[in-house]
Amino acid sequence: MDDDGRYRDGRSDFIRGAKDIAKVAKKQVGKKVGRGMDKMTDEYTKRSYKRFEEEDDDDYAGVPSNDGGYYPNDNRANDDEGHSDSTEGHDEDDEIYEGEYQGIPRADSGKAGSMDGVTAAQAQQFRDLSAYEGERRKDQEELAQQYETILQECGHGKFQWTLYFVLGLALMADGVEIFVVGFVLPSAEKDMCLSEPNKGMLGLIVYLGMMVGAFVWGGLADRIGRRQTLLISLSINSVFAFFSSFVQGYSSFLFCRLASGVGIGGSIPIVFSYYSEFLAQEKRGEHLSWLCMFWMIGGIYASAMAWAIIPHYGWSFQMGSAYQFHSWRVFVLVCAFPSVAAISALTTMPESPRFYLENGKHDEAWMILKQVHDTNMRAKGYPERVFSVTTIKTVKQMDELVNMGDGAAWHEKWRIKLTTLFHQVWSNFQTVFSPEYRRTTYMMMAVWFSMSFSYYGLTVWFPDMIKYLQKQEYSSRTKVFVKEKVEHVTFNFTLENQVHRQGEYFNDKFMNLKMKSMVFEDSLFEECYFEDITSSNTFFKNCTFIATLFYNTDLFKYRLINCKLVNSTFLHNKEGCLLSDISDENNAYMVYFVSFLGTLAVLPGNIVSALLMDKIGRLRMLAGSSVISCISCFFLSFGNSESAMIALLCLFGGISIASWNALDVLTVELYPSDKRTTAFGFLNALCKLAAVLGISIFTSFVGITKAVPILFASGALAAGSFLALKLPETRGQVLQ
């Protein structure tokens, strides 16, 4: 019994000592958060406790410290704050036992006691985290003020303008990506035999890719850096844009365009955040608006290249029947040039110093800011001016240490790194919806969604309406022939836009010709000869063919609707795709011309928004432009001709661009640097989702009614302008 008593006493002493170790460790963590010592203390505590647990009963007492705690050879105990239950009193409710560190409940305790211990630990952890967040917030506020002062000293000059053109190329690549698929569809459908659903999917897949890319790259840019993330995203865009010009099948082309869209999706969120962190407060709104002009330049570049390249069908080659490289593929290849140029130029530019300071990298940030200062001063003729800043505030860090072990395999290390990075990105994204930013985020989501839904929906609806009006006008010029009799005639010229009813054709030859929008109804063809026929939107309905030969034609039987064939033969049918619509050079040029005008029309809006952004404020610019755009939607009811629709397209684009510029500036300034690209990327992803919904809904009403698109667009813009006024104004404020 004596031995048992000594055993229990020694065990109790051990437990008390272990508890003291845990308490001291917690206090050390609370005091030294953001430094490496807190992790070392935790690990030391765990190792010490484990060693105590494995020692014999005679060693349980350990080595007493000055404060009564039990530390085996520990020289880090806090003499002022440590205490021991054995000398200063004992609280049975706080007593821990051997398995508590492993989360094993005490066998002889009730649930209430266990929950009290867990609750106390959680409360302490919460207090520690709150203290850390408070210190970090204070550091960020001090950094924001000091950083603005430093940018004032660096001035605005050669460095910012160089970065302006470099990032402009990246934004230009985003503008090009939007137009590529729309321009190549009329030609690509011939090579790939695209059905209407396939064409629709190809048009939407770019937006889906950009949606994913914006969210992913935006989150990564806040963790690994703006410059590095932008280089990776542009590289992915360039590689898959290059591949898409060579792949032959529809599925592979669709995948390449999806991956290309994922790559370019990071352009807008990163470019605006990156550039804003080199701009002083009084220059930020204006120069971010000037940067938006490169999106317009991208659209103009795409339209001009399509106009110059795609109609030149001679710019092609083929290797047998399996591989074809036509002019539209040259256009796709040329559209990758802005992205490649942006990558080359971006390698010469530094990372954002604000990102470095937010992540505790003082020396790297100081060197970049000195580079900005010296570059601008030399360009202004003051090379003797010295960068006076010696110390810059950095933000406390709480990145968890990940012990991967020396013997871990390389793939295991990468898995752990990627998993840790994913958790960091996801945690940062969740803070965008924290109580501090929740209202702002929800309001911005509503504004972004309403703007994108109406803008993209209408900008795609306009060209579709123009095509519909073209078809209506084309149909009005259809010639109708009834009960004609034609014998021993050779047709070797193009037949277009005609309807023949109850005709009789005897011993006629149709050779080396094109049939466009031709319809034969209730007609008789006897001893006729069809050779080398290429057709589009051509059908024979309720016709009879007697002793007729079809040689090297694309008049397949699906074009013969309810027809009767008597002793008629089809030989050497043409291979390739059967197109239901007319696709000629005139229509192609019209598509490129309309896109060129619509893109160029935003130039006045860009200039006005850049000049007034810092004078009237972001909210007035956003709400005012949205209201005027809403009013302009009602003019759509007067768009009854092709020229009227083109004019309305230019009007709407020129007005609404000011809203987009203000929204981009506002998004950059509403969120702090460590959440800026994450929030921007999420909102831009939501923008692309709204674009897909808007395009799908608006285009479904083409040729049916104008009222629904008008009401949807005007209602969304009105709601967006109202909600925009509820947002905080950021003009004149330092960058958070």
Image (cartoon, rainbow, N blue to C red):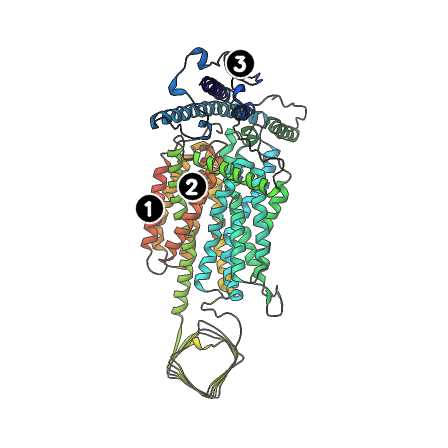
From the top left corner, tell me how far across and down residue 401 is, in percent. 55, 31
- Near-viewer residue (521 or 438): 438
Question: Is disc 1 surrounded by few (<14), some (14 to 19) or many (20+) residues within 10 Å?
Answer: some
The amino acid pointed to by label 2 is Ser
The amino acid pointed to by label 1 is Gly
Please report contact status of discs 3 and 1: CB closer than 8 Å, yes or no: no
Task: Please give the residue where the numbered disc 2 appears in the rendered image.
Answer: 659
Residue 290 in sight in this render: no
Viewer-nearest of labels 2 and 3? Answer: 3
- Near-viewer residue (596 or 186): 186
Task: Please give the residue where the numbered disc 1 appears in the rendered image.
Answer: 715
Task: Please give the residue where the numbered disc 3 appears in the rendered image.
Answer: 64
- Near-viewer residue (528 or 552): 552
From the top left corner, tell me how far across and down residue 12 is, in percent. 45, 19
- Under circle 1, the secondary element is helix
Please indicate whether residue 221 sits to the left or right of residue 467 in the image: right
From the top left corner, tell me how far across and down residue 281 is, in percent. 50, 29
